[in-house]
Image (tube, grey):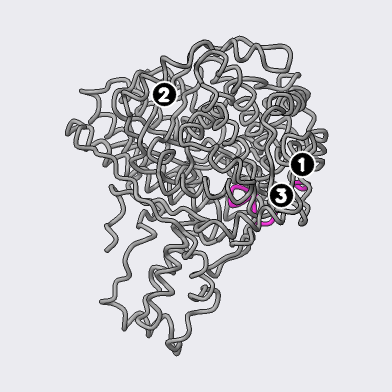
Amino acid sequence: MATPHLNGPHRPTARRDMHVSVRSPIAPIHRARAAALATLLLGHTTAAQIPVGYWDTDRSQPLLERTLEITLAPDLTGLPANERDAVQRLLEAGEILQRIYEDQKHAQALDAFESLNELISTESPVALDHLQQLYRLFKGPIATTLDNRRVAFLPVRDESPGKAVFPEGIGAAEVRTFIAAGTDRDDILTERTVVRRATLENLRQDIASLQDYPVLGTLHPGLGEHLARLVQSPDARVLYAVPYSVAWAPSLVRTYDLLWEAADLVRPTDADFSDYLRLRARDLLSDDYEGSDAAWVTGRFKRLNAQIGSYETYDDALFGVKTFFGMNVLLRDEARSADLSSALGNLQAIEDRLPHEPHRRIRDTIPVGVYNVVADFGQARGANTATILPNDADHSRKYGRTIMLRYNIMTDPAIFAQSRRRLAAATLPAFHDDLTVEGNFQRTLWHEIGHYLGVDVARDGRPLGLALQETADLYEELKADLVSLYSGSYLRDLGYLDDAALRSFHASGILRVLQTNEPRPAQPYQRMQLMQWNYFLEAGLLDFDTIEGRLTIDYARYDDVVGQLLADVLAIQRDGDAARARAFVEQYTGWDDDLHGIVAANIRDALEYRYYLVRYAVIDPPIH
């Protein structure tokens, strides 16, 4: 059946304007209106003042001084003209998803951003410019401080564990109690729904979205009837869920149109990529990505690729189940991609040697591409080096997964210099030269492949996200790290790595675990790294020299220690016991100021930068 296009009769003739702003968070201050707006908004403030709740330069400057700005500017001149035009549509779609992501993370983010942009004052332009930069850096109004606290730098409420995809301030116990008390409530913890309280205001808003965009009612049968029943007896104690496409209807409908336009533009030169964009456009409105995931993983794209939609759950600190929007536009490095694909070999052999039973049959090859980032948006924005998607175990079983390596991030010399400095600050001089760019590249590649191997569902068939709940992401990342490290010696035996490359590969694994601050409970990435650090210390792979305040690495212990921890992790995933999973995390996330604290302080003192602010030549104005 043909995909319904939303141009024409599907658009409402009159509706509320709910489309989120796509104005850039680094838009310049318009000083032509400064005098009038300063008088209106600031009243009697003096040159030394900005309104209450906004950070001044004394608070913002220390963070920005430790921020490394990099600009990504891959050459697009080799693209056909139609594909360059398609890129522009994709960039506009990305800006929309960027705003949705900010809205997902904090209910007041967009209003705070608009207020900041309107707060134009000739009295404090530097302070306001700093706040705009912080908003861009942290993708919202909450900063991660140098001592790893989450603090608002604009006048907004404190961050909620469930962000804005759960009701403000709700706890996990209330949600679990509500689910346990009734039936037909499975959608509360599904990955692409917003959970709301059944107030009259909320229900009317969601019913209006279905009326404004009838296609959403078609794609989500029964939702309108469910909301109609709830609105007869509104009750804030009752929870209900609506799909993301209903919660952000105008924005996602506009994104649909942009993806469809991009698909039409690219069709003459890349039919497979065009098919993917059309299917993804539809799936953003159905909130079911299976069709477009299949087209994404199995398609043979030529020059462009794009990750589009909500996949990762790291921002959900309440249950770890809600996905958050992200997008990137990628330019393929054909030569490096071809070399890498031919070198991967038989992945089944690596699966079969992992320390768990039963092994599963996997596809012998998976799509791997080396790309240069054109632009990132939402959760994907930043200095992350690689991605493997989709995460859905059923989609992965049916269609496989795709790996996207971000070459211009992974090999950026300024970022790599920070990595070398980090390892040198934490270890004795004998280990300072072990790390190379290639070692980092290979460990990252095999980390992504590690997501594809090992346990993918619990013993009883439950998805790992539901089985392990808030620790699921932590264990998935931990598994991928360990599969990568465990495979290193085998790859050397195959001739894929030589001895020097293996040492660098293993050094990259040690670099991965080092922390600059004690992780917060809401930081699954950092906590899983701390777990490795502590396990490696306990098992003798790492040792702490109390006189020098530095670590030593016993590379001879590497395979045994990593294999032991990997076996424990795979067993916990297979068992699917959330309580056991939490207990193991608690066992290995202790922090000793006389050990971890000393190493972390050494790293902090050595690092020139703590944050990366990534800019993109295609969307950011030049900085003079």
Instruction: Determine which residue is flagged by label 2.
Output: 296
Q: Identify which residue is drawn at 47% across, 80% down.
A: 50
Q: CA distance from mark 2 to mark 1?
A: 35 Å
Q: CA distance from mark 3 to mark 2?
A: 34 Å
Image spot of residue 436 (x, y percent): 49, 36
What is the x, y in percent for residue 424? 58, 48
**Disc assigned to residue 521:** 3
Is residue 312 part of the magenta span, yes or no? no
Say which label, 2 or 1, has the lower sequence index.
Answer: 1
Of residues 75 and 462, which is closer to you in this image? 75
Nearest to the eye among marks 3 and 2: give it. Answer: 3
Q: Earlier in the sequence, mark 3 or mark 1?
A: 1
Decide which of 279, 461 is in the foreground and name it: 461
Please name the amino acid that badge 2 sits on.
Answer: Trp
Please indicate whether residue 566 sits to the left or right of residue 444 in the image. right
Q: Is residue 154 above or below residue 219?
A: below
Residue matched to label 1: 176
Amino acid on which disc 1 is placed:
Arg
Q: CA distance from mark 3 to mark 1?
A: 20 Å
Query: Mark 2 Cα within 10 Å, few/some/many (few <14, many 20+)?
Result: many
Per the rendered image, the range of residues in magenta is 162-174
Residue, x 51% and y 21% (percent of image)? Answer: 497
Q: Secondary structure at mark 2?
A: helix
The quadrant in which the C terminus is found is bottom left
Position of 450 with respect to 326 (left or right) is right
Label 1 crowd bin: few (<14), some (14–19), many (20+), radius 10 Å:
few
Name the one closer to the observer, 456 or 107. Answer: 456
* Residue 160 in view here: yes
Corner quadrant of residue 411:
top left
**Which of labels 3 and 1 is toward the front?**
3
User: Tags 3 and 1 in contact by the CB under 8 Å rule?
Assistant: no
